[in-house]
Amino acid sequence: MSNTQHEQIIRKGYAVAEAMDVPGFVNSFTPDGTFTDEAFGNVFTGPKELAIMLQVFGNAFPDMHRELHRIYSVDDMVVVELALQGTHKGPLAVPGGFIPPTGKRMNAPCCDVFRLVDGKIKAFNCYWSAATVLAQLGVSSRASPWYALSPRRRSTRRRLTATPRFRRMSSTGWRNSACSAVSRTRSRGPADSEDRRLARCDARGRSQRSVYHRDPRHNVDLSQANARPPSRSPPGTSRFRACRSATSRASRD
């Protein structure tokens, strides 16, 4: 099939989605076709799952419209630049819960990538901007739950939260601290960053020792703990004879 025919097939698929024709949308796929929600990393396969995202957006945005900007067709691949538009009048289902209706308008960029086989969709990968949608609906990206992040960012957060450094940081400032640490390391270079890390560790150890020395709860003067004990006077010296005579007088008394 020619590129023009592939473009017509995709345009027809968008028209079916605009009309919320679920059976027609499912029939536009091959029997083993897949729909991938790249924003949350979900893959839908089979007639019972292919139309899930169509219904999710249809329930949350009853006036859902897909504004097509550009369509590129090469061989069996079709790429579409578009915008998702609609008014949030129903609950938006996301992994882990629902976002209640806000009545706000959505106009988010999106990129759809199709692979066609024998005039039907073999694979449909939808790259819609979840961060833009959440921001336009009034859901702060800083206060958004973990499921509002992409799979790569979720795995990054899990790695960061498992480190002792994260447990020492506040819940509101861990992102800025982690990002600034990365930027400082990149600007200094590996050798310089290692030297500075060792210097920080040495300074931290000195500060802890100084606090420990002046802590009134300790009965021992730790600043003198490593001092060399006085050596005993060898026999025959005046100090040794004086100590021996004092000891003998004390025993007689």
Image (spheres, rainbow, N blue to C red):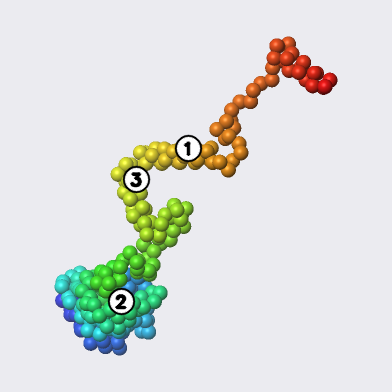
Identified by mark 1, the residue type is: Arg
Disc 3 + disc 1, Cβ < 8 Å? no
Q: CA distance from mark 3 to mark 2?
A: 44 Å
Q: Residues within 10 Å of mark 2 (few under 14, many from 20)?
A: some
What residue sits right under mark 2 in the picture? 122
In this picture, is 75 found above or below 54? Answer: above
The location of residue 210, given as percent across then percent down, is: 49, 37
Q: Is residue 109 above or below residue 175?
A: below
Q: Nearer the viewer, residue 79 or 206?
A: 206
Residue found at x 43% / y 61%: 158
**Residue drawn 44% across the image and 58% down it:** 161
Element at label 2: strand
Q: Mark 1: which secondary structure?
A: helix
- Eyeballing the image, is 249 above or below 213? above
Q: Which amino acid lies under the numbered mark 2 shown in the image of this protein? A: Lys
The residue that mark 3 highlights is 185
Q: Quadrant of residue 20?
A: bottom left
Quadrant (top left/top right/bottom left/bottom right) for the N terminus: bottom left
Q: CA distance from mark 2 to mark 1?
A: 64 Å
At mark 3, the secondary structure is helix
The mark closer to the camera, 3 or 2, is 3
Q: Is residue 74 left or right of residue 197?
A: left
Residue position for label 1: 206
- Image coordinates of residue 81 in percent, x first then y, are 19, 71
Asked if disc 3 and disc 2 are in contact, CB closer than 8 Å, the reply is no
Q: Are marks 2 and 1 in contact (CB under 8 Å)?
A: no
Amino acid type at image mark 3: Thr
Mark 1 burial class by Cα count in 10 Å: few <14, some 14-19, many 20+: few
Name the N-terminal-most of marks 2 and 1. 2
Between disc 3 and disc 2, whose residue precedes? Answer: 2
